[in-house]
Image (cartoon, grey):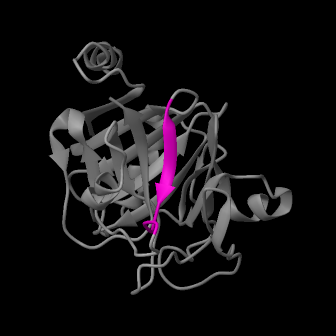
Amino acid sequence: MIRYAVFLLVMFLPGWASAVTCQDEGFEGTSMTVCTVDVTQEDLRLFLRDDSGTVLGQFRDIERDLADEQKLAFAMNAGMYHANRSPVGYYVENNKEQAPLLTNASRGNFGLLPNGVFCITPKSAQVIETLTFAKHAPECRDATQSGPMLVIDGALHPRFLKDSTSRFLRNGVGTSKDGTTAYFVISNTPVTFHRFGRFFRDVLKTPNALYFDGKVSRLHAPQLDRSDAGFWLGPMVGVITSE
């Protein structure tokens, strides 16, 4: 009910005729911000470099490159990256593959298998486990690989521990079963993988969800008068709207 009320309020605010809503929610003592995107209505896409090939790195850099009549309605960091800010795993932007799919175990959270791919088409978005993605090779206009998976076909990642003491700010994405809705979440206080995954599974009811990153997690949400700055980012995901 609260999420629906906020949706109605935002829809009728001047300048916010958008199918993107962002709101703060509490979950077991942890503050989360959830941005919900209607993928059938919104221009959801990935961002890495500008037209000259320079890595963007900050939300303001995306805004700088937009046309005068466009604005950035929402954005978030969207996957792990190397020191030069190139993507660690599979990355596709505007139908152009820039980094290959990685299917083997590796170090760090990315290699905590199973990991997955966030795949965007013009009218849908899905989180897909990496080996399933490799087997079926879906066509994505934009895609970013990250890891670990948070939720896999309704189940938490098998290596998440309820009593873990590893807590960080974290962000990720989950998608509805039909692919029409994407839920982008950032924790505003440190959280374990187990609790973060359960928020997607038990509150948002997403059958699949993917971890983007921790510690460098950033959010651009003008509805909340929020635009985080800090670490230079690699891949970012956002929604572009016309004023």
Q: Is residue 91 above or below residue 162?
A: below
| One can see residue 201 in this view | no
Measured as percent of width and height from the top left, residue 188 is found at 21, 51
Q: Which residues are magenta?
A: 42-51
Residue at the far front in the pictured view: 68
- Specify whether residue 214 is painted magenta: no
Q: Nearer the viewer, residue 201 or 50?
A: 50
Q: Nearer the viewer, residue 231 or 63?
A: 63
Measured as percent of width and height from the top left, residue 155 is found at 60, 47
What residue do we see at 28% from left, 73% from top?
A: 232
What residue do we see at 57% from left, 77% from top?
A: 111
What residue do we see at 81% from left, 58% from top?
A: 137
Measured as percent of width and height from the top left, residue 21 is found at 34, 29
Image quadrant containing the C terminus: top left
Question: Picture quarter containing residue 136?
Answer: bottom right
| Left or right: 138 in relation to 129 | right
Image quadrant containing the N terminus: top left
Q: Is residue 40 above or below residue 133?
A: above
Q: Nearer the viewer, residue 224 or 127?
A: 224
Measured as percent of width and height from the top left, residue 93 is found at 58, 60
Residue at the far right in the pictured view: 135
- Specify whether residue 49 is painted magenta: yes
| One can see residue 85 in this view | yes
Q: Is residue 161 above or below residue 98?
A: above
What residue do we see at 19% from left, 36% from top?
A: 224
